[in-house]
Amino acid sequence: MTRPVKVDAVAVPSPYDGHGSLEIVRIDYVPRQLTIVARDANGGAPIGVSFAGVVAHRVMDERDLAEYWPACSLPSGWVFFIQSGGWLSHEMVRPGSCIGSFYGEVREYLVAGLTDCVSVLCTGEPRFGLECRSS
């Protein structure tokens, strides 16, 4: 069994104040575009984050992402830019992966929810917005 590599990450500034826990309530994917909607577990308006140029995404329970903690946890943020040690780092050296050579400059972000988390490999930067539809 190999030990997980420690992740180096920085929080992406967002309109969410970071006081409380966010639950991911909806994930919408259309080719190369991903929108994630989260809601404060204590109520309040939902907030969305969208990614363009999506190469890949995965949804996992936070317990299965131990290498991302504590670097990617509230109250420091809920969307994190992964600088090293994450899923993208693994894909860059995995035999058979074309991510490093086919898509140009790919970045990794982690959207941290109360239980579910979404890893996103993309060529665009996240865009935030308040979501008006009910979930």
Image: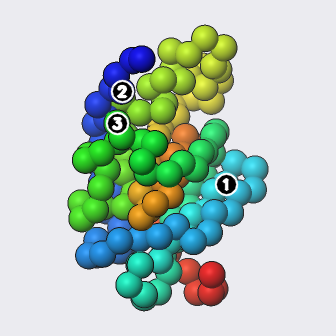
| Percent coordinates x, y for residue 102 in the rendering | 65, 23
Q: Nearer the viewer, mark 2 or mark 1?
A: 2
Separation of residues labelled 2 and 1 (CA atoms) = 29 Å
Q: Residue at x 59, y 45 (%)?
A: 58
In three-dimensional space, the C-alpha distance between marks 3 and 1, rounded to whole angstroms, equals 26 Å
Determine the residue positioned at 42% across, 87% down. 43
Q: Position of residue 49 (x, y in %)?
A: 51, 65
Compared with 123, 59 (above or below) is: below
- Mark sitting earlier along the chain (3/2): 2
Check disc 1 and report the residue beneath it.
33
The amino acid type found where label 1 is placed reads: Gln
Residue 65 image position (x, y, % from top left): 42, 42
The numbered dot on residue 67 is 3
Res 4 label = 2
Nearer the camera: disc 3 or disc 1: 3
Residue 127 visible somewhere in the drawing: no
Residue closest to the far front: 1
Q: Is residue 104 above or below residue 77?
A: above
Q: Pick the residue in front: 18 or 123.
A: 18
Whether the residues at callouts 3 and 2 have beta carbons within 8 Å, the answer is yes
Q: Residues within 10 Å of mark 2 (few under 14, many from 20)?
A: few
Secondary element at tag 3 = helix
Does residue 74 appear in the picture of this structure?
Answer: yes
State the colouring used for the structure image. rainbow
Label 3: how many Cα within 10 Å (few below 14, some 14–19, many 20+): some
Residue 44 vs 123, above or below: the answer is below
Q: Reading the chain from its start, which is encountered first: label 2 or label 1? A: 2
- In the foreground, 130 or 21: 21
Question: Which amino acid is tagged 2?
Answer: Pro
Q: Quadrant location of the N terminus?
A: top left
Question: Which comes before the other along the chain, label 3 or label 1?
Answer: 1
